[in-house]
Structures are given as C-alpha cells and as structure tokens.
Amino acid sequence: MSLLFTDFASWQAHCAETGEPLYQPVLAYEIEQKGRTEDEIWAGLQRAYDVMRDAVHEGLTGNMTSRSGMINNGAKKIAASPVTVLSPEFKQLVTRALGAKEVNSCMGRVVAAPTAGASGILPGVLVTLQDLHKLDDRKILEGLLVAAGIALIIEQNASLAGAVGGCQAETGSAAAMGSGAIVYCLGGPVEQVFAAVAVTIQCMLGLVCDPVAGLVEVPCVVRNASASAIAFSSAQIAIAGIDPVIPVDQCVAALGEVGQAMETRYKETALGGLAATKRGKEIEKMVLVQDVNILPDEADE
C-alpha cells in the first residue's frame, strides 16, 4: 500500500508547493487506496459522521449499562447534574465524548477513529465544534480527512494502538486528530493545525493503557472525555499562535520512543496501573465468573 506522507513536514511542503488545502492530498489518497470515485469517498465520510452523531445521541438517550456494570449511564448523569463546574459548552463536550464512548462499551455502533477504544473523542469534538461555530457538514468532513491524515502519519512513526504504545497512542492520537481538525475547520493555517497536534501529543505523552478486567471501559470512557478537553485546549493554544517549541514530527518521534520504552504491563495487558489495584482485581474475578456462567453448557450443544 502506498503511503500518503512519511511525516508532517512532507505534507506541509506538498500543500505549500501545490496550493492545495490540507484535506486534498488525503482525499486523493482515499480515492487511490479504495478504488472509488470522489463522490463515493465524500458519501462514505458522511456515513461515518452520521454514525458519530448517532453515537453521541444514543449515549445521551439510550440505556448505557455495560454487562460488567462498570459503565452505567455516566453521560446522562453528567448532563443532569444540578451542580456544574463547567461552562455549558464544556459540559456538552464532556458528556458527548463520554456518551459516544459508552455506546462502544455497551456494544453499540461506533466509528473507530482511530480505534474503538478512542471512539468517543472525535464525535464529541466534531459535534461540539459544529454546534459552537455553526459549520456545515462539508467542512466537518474536510476536517475528518485532515484527522485521517494525522492518524496515518502517527501510525507510521509511532502507533495508534494501546497494546503497542499505551493509552498515549490511542486516546492521544484521537485527541491529536481532533485538535488538528478543529484548527483546520476554523480556518487556521497549516502551521497552526500541526502546532495543535504537537501540543496535544505533549499533553498526552506517557499515558498508560491499564483497562480494568481487560475491558475497554474503565478508565477508557473517562479518558475519552478528558482527551476531548485536551483537544479543545490544544486547538485554542495553537490558534492563538503559541509556538509548541518542539516540532510536531519530533513530538511524534517522542510518542513512539515512550511507547517502546513503556513496560508491557502498561500496554493493554491489564497487568499494571488501575487494572492491578485491589478493586481492579476484584472486578476482574467477577467478570471472569460472569463470562464462565454465560458460556453454553457442553451437554446442551
């Protein structure tokens, strides 16, 4: 499979030379890789965004109770909380990201962006961005292409998987995709889009992947909410023209280096961190018993 670009510098240089917007080479890449027309690619992006919006809606209206019991309608509880420490817009962002990820934990339909474990971040970010700035769907779809390009480069030079690079690689990549998309959709230049990615990685660097009982529920759901907040704050920092100091490609290299150095127990094995706490082990035993109980009896097969 041919690659889009090997790094952000190449992507920026291409756009500077051709005058193309950031999403254009990603669109061309999608057309080439999938063997589809441009109209078909746009239609696919629209379907993906529709699923994201549906996940946000379902997370705030449906019964989001996971089989383990660890997920129990958290987004709706936040939305209904009589005491709030956040602005209405910030609260909406948190509830939407958390709710969309709860849909994943409850076996609902989501878009893996870039992974199912981080599937609440882009929906929460993009739906909130669209509401705040009254953007049309076309602009959001362009932002999705920019986000995809960001993910492709991170994947080549570091990782998108918690099992390879820890949660910094999974929710960190999704947050970076979201922050870059925000700046692009608001008209920021390429330098600011990539600065947002750099700042996001700096904020997420070192985060371990430690799912309790091996389920993508705790702490994954709340990390989707906090990563969405980091995406917005990073975008604000970048769009104000603040220099991230460390260039984005070097931030990605650091992400890969930290992921390689991270011990195995902190990479989706449920052997360290929160998964290894006393309560985490208790939940693991309970979930194991539940799994055994629902397996069919061999005599009945």
Image: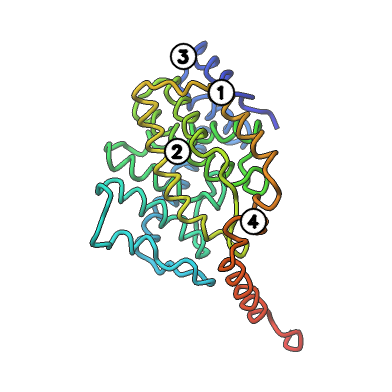
Amino acid type for the residue under numbered disc 2: Gly
Can you tell which mark lies on residue 178? 2
Residue 11: image x %, image y %?
A: 55, 21
Instruction: State which quadrant residue 271 falls in.
Output: bottom right
Pick out the residue farthest to the right: 299
For label 3, count other residues whose C-alpha is less than 10 Å away and answer few (under 14), some (14-19) or many (20+): few
Could you tell which of marks 1 and 4 lies nearer the N-terminus? 1
Q: Secondary structure at mark 1?
A: helix
Q: Is residue 74 visible?
A: yes
Q: Quadrant of residue 286?
A: bottom right
For residue 8, the mark is: 1
Q: Are marks 2 and 4 in contact (CB under 8 Å)?
A: no
Quadrant in which residue 151 is drawn: top right
Earlier sequence position, callout 4 versus callout 3: 3
Query: Which residue: 53% across, 35% down?
Result: 148
- x, y (%) of residue 215? 59, 62
**Nearest the camera: 147 or 90?**
90
User: Where does label 3 land, which residue?
Assistant: 19
With respect to residue 166, does 145 lie above or below?
above
The structure residue drawn at horizontal position 65% and vertical position 50%, both measured from the top left corner, is 266
Q: Position of residue 279 (x, y in %)?
A: 56, 68
At numbered mark 4, what does the secondary structure look like: helix, strand or loop? Answer: loop
Measure the alpha-carbon separation of dots 1 and 4.
33 Å
Report, in whole angstroms, how far the alpha carbon at label 2 lies from the one at label 4. Answer: 28 Å
Upstream in the sequence, badge 1 or badge 2?
Answer: 1
Q: Which residue is mark 4?
A: 272
Q: Amino acid at mark 3?
A: Gly
Image depth: mark 1 or mark 4 in front: 4
Residue 245: % across, % down: 49, 21
Q: Residues within 10 Å of mark 1 (few under 14, many from 20)?
A: many
Identity, as a three-letter code, of the amino acid under mark 4: Gly
Answer above or below: position of 137 versus 13: below
